Amino acid sequence: MRGMSPYSNAGLRALDLAHVWHPCTQMKDHESTMPLVPIRSGAGVWLEDPDGHRYLDAISSWWVNLWGHAHPRINAAVQEQLHRLPHVMFAGFTHEPAARLAAELTALAPTGLNRCFFADSGSASIEVAVKMSFHYWQNVGRTGKTRFVTLANSYHGETLGALAVGSVELYKAIYRPLLMDVITVASPDASNGEPGETADDVARRRAAEFEAVLAEQADSIAAVILEPLVQCAGNMRMYDPLYLRLVREACDRHAVHLIADEIAVGFGRTGTLFACEQAGITPDFLCLSKGLTAGYLPMSVVLTRESIYAAFYDEYIKLNAFLHSHSYSGNPLACAAALASLELFRERDALVANQTLAAHLGAATHSAFSAHPHVAEIRQCGMIVAVEFVRDRQARQNFDWRERRHLHIYRHALKRGVLLRPLGNVIYFMPPYVITPAEIDLMVTVAREGLDLAVSAAV
């Protein structure tokens, strides 16, 4: 994995801090509290810095990497495409990688989604779906349907439209004056059930509350948007698939679109290729990104129904076309990576293989954390596992967020050669699908060590 680089860790950190502004970061932290981690190469689940230190990527580099870093099959596909056609505008032009990818995605997606609109990021795909839904109702004469329903604790991205339809205050609060008003309903998060309630009970109760909103306001509502099964940025909160089915039925009864944001949970993360499959439903819009290109290139896609596409299909002079564009829409390199990734799913029978990995991950996590006096809950959905830690397990009392105890876990893990990035008081694992049982054991052990340090640290 070693390669020639003119920079040491210290040299690259200095160069970066002089010129770069990083995402989702208080940059002052990088001067002392959280020194930047330079990376020069990657192979499989491992990343390597210029000084030769290695880090197991337990979170798939923000949930994008499926098959490990620098996978030879995807490398070859992108390289072959690079020599043929790196990019061409996608307005008025087409190319084989995009056409093939659209055909394959529509064949794999829930039944009825047979049109693909390409964009360049997860947030952009949310913007596309929101605009398409609104515009559809305008085109069919239901001009009063202008509002959107979102779930509490949801996250859909950080461009203004995507931010508006999310509800994590950490990201949203400061920008509220810039955002459209939305209707927020309670999350079906199974962890917040009443005493004695099952996840199924919570799903039914929250779905009934959701339908009550539609019954009263459907004439003004264009769509509901949700993250199927796991609210990832909302501390990996999870809920029963029954909620999806009940929401789909309610949307059908009240003529409201369902937008499924599978940007983080798509492509096998929850145990099925798409999380919606576990409820046996088809959304009206399916937003995909992150794992779409297996962590290689920025790209997203919105899949939708022929009936929605038909509402925009008309003579030019009607001016009802969907005039939304991205300069890199349908980028051939990204399409080539996505196609290679889909081939790996078929050849490896990855969803079946992941069942074994998920079982090992769950067992290792429960063995390490279930008896810990500061662990309130362990949650799992397929290849996503979350460990929520608290100050007082019995009272479910959280640590003060200003203590930033998760940083002890992050820093300890780096020292031990593991990349973990807890979401506040939630440690989570979302590794690439090529991880081995031994590597799972390592990352879980290191996380347990980090938690012990975090809860005992003086503040």
Image (tube, rainbow, N blue to C red):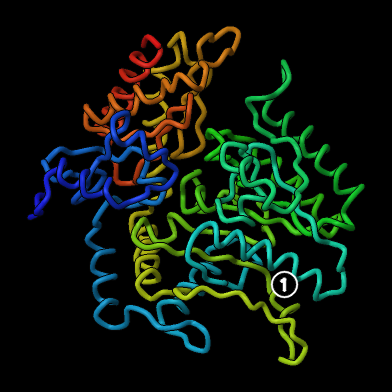
Residue visible at 57% across and 33% down? 237
Q: Among all residues in the image, which is located at the extreme right?
A: 216
Name the quarter where the C terminus is drawn.
Answer: top left
Q: Is residue 446 left or right of residue 324?
A: left
The residue that label 1 is drawn on is 308
Q: Is residue 138 above or below residue 72?
A: below
Q: Is residue 255 above or below residue 88?
A: above
Label 1 secondary element: helix
Residue 154 makes an appearance in the image: no
Name the residue type under label 1. Ile
Residue 329 location, x and y as percent?
A: 48, 74
Residue visible at 65% across and 51% down? 280
Residue visible at 82% across and 56% down? 221
Decide which of 283, 131 is in the foreground and name it: 131
Q: Is residue 315 above or below residue 60?
A: below
Decide which of 312, 249 is in the foreground and name it: 312
Q: Is residue 222 above or below residue 404?
A: below
Q: Among all residues in the image, which is located at the extreme front?
A: 18
- Quarter occupied by residue 317: bottom right
Using a 10 Å C-alpha cutoff, classify the residue at mark 1 as few (fewer than 14 neighbours), some (14 to 19) or many (20 or more).
many
Residue 103 makes an appearance in the image: yes
- Quarter occupied by residue 38: top left
Residue visible at 74% across and 87% down? 314
Q: Is residue 418 left or right of residue 371?
A: left
Residue 193 location, x and y as percent?
A: 70, 23
Residue 30 location, x and y as percent?
A: 31, 36
Residue 377 location, x and y as percent?
A: 53, 20
Q: Is residue 301 left or right of residue 241?
A: left
